[in-house]
Image (cartoon, rainbow, N blue to C red):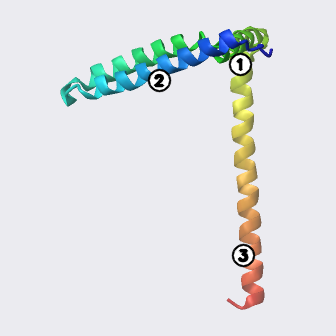
């Protein structure tokens, strides 16, 4: 989906991005003015401000495209047929056994080749 940009939407996008940038700089200054003992509040406030700035930026044309993409992705994820717990555990056992067998084969091959080359090199 490609959104057509009109001069009105471009000016709106520019205004919103400038607003987001100014708010991000102001919030960064405000957050670092806290003492170290309020570190937990700084983190929580940072997360809240990041969420707020992300929400504001969704009103741009890029934000609307991202929102549409995420909604489409979520609807596609709901269509996926996920394996059952038993199937996952069975396949995990098969993978672990396969890894063990291949590693033992590689160990045997490495040991055999090391002994052969040691014999021929006289070591």
At x 74%, y 14%, the residue is 5
**If you read the primary sequence from the N terminus, does the residue marked by circle 2 or circle 3 appear first?**
2
Question: Residue 42 appears at what percent x and percent y?
Answer: 30, 23
Q: Which mark is residue 26?
A: none
For the residue labelled by badge 1, is the local secondary structure a helix, a strand or a loop?
Answer: helix
79 sits left or right of 32 in the view: right
Viewer-proximal residue among 92 and 16: 16
Alpha carbons under labels 1 and 2: distance apart? 50 Å
Marks 2 and 3 in Cβ contact (< 8 Å): no
Q: Quadrant of the N terminus?
A: top right
Marks 3 and 1 in Cβ contact (< 8 Å): no
In the rendered image, which residue does mark 2 sit on? Answer: 21
For the residue labelled by badge 3, is the local secondary structure a helix, a strand or a loop?
Answer: helix
Q: Is residue 48 above or below residue 114?
A: above
Viewer-proximal residue among 17 and 108: 17
In the rendered image, which residue does mark 3 sit on? Answer: 114
In the rendered image, which residue does mark 1 sit on? Answer: 86
Question: Residue 73 appears at what percent x and percent y?
Answer: 73, 14
Q: Quadrant of residue 80?
A: top right
At x 69%, y 13%, the residue is 7
12 sits left or right of 42 in the view: right
Structural crowding at the residue carrying mark 1, measured as other residues with C-alpha within 10 Å and reported as few (<14), some (14–19) or many (≥20)? few
């Amino acid at each position: 989906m490609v959104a057509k940009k009109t001069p009105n939407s471009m000016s709106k996008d520019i205004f919103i991005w400038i607003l987001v940038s100014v708010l991000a700089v102001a919030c960064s200054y405000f957050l670092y003015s806290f003492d170290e003992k309020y570190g937990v509040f700084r983190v929580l406030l940072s997360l809240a401000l990041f969420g707020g700035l992300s929400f504001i930026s969704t009103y741009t044309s890029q934000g609307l495209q991202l929102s549409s993409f995420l909604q489409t992705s979520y609807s596609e994820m709901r269509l996926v047929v996920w394996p059952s717990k038993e199937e996952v555990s069975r396949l995990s056992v098969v993978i672990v056994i396969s890894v063990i067998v291949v590693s033992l084969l590689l160990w045997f091959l490495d040991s055999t080749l090391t002994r052969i080359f040691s014999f021929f090199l006289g070591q």
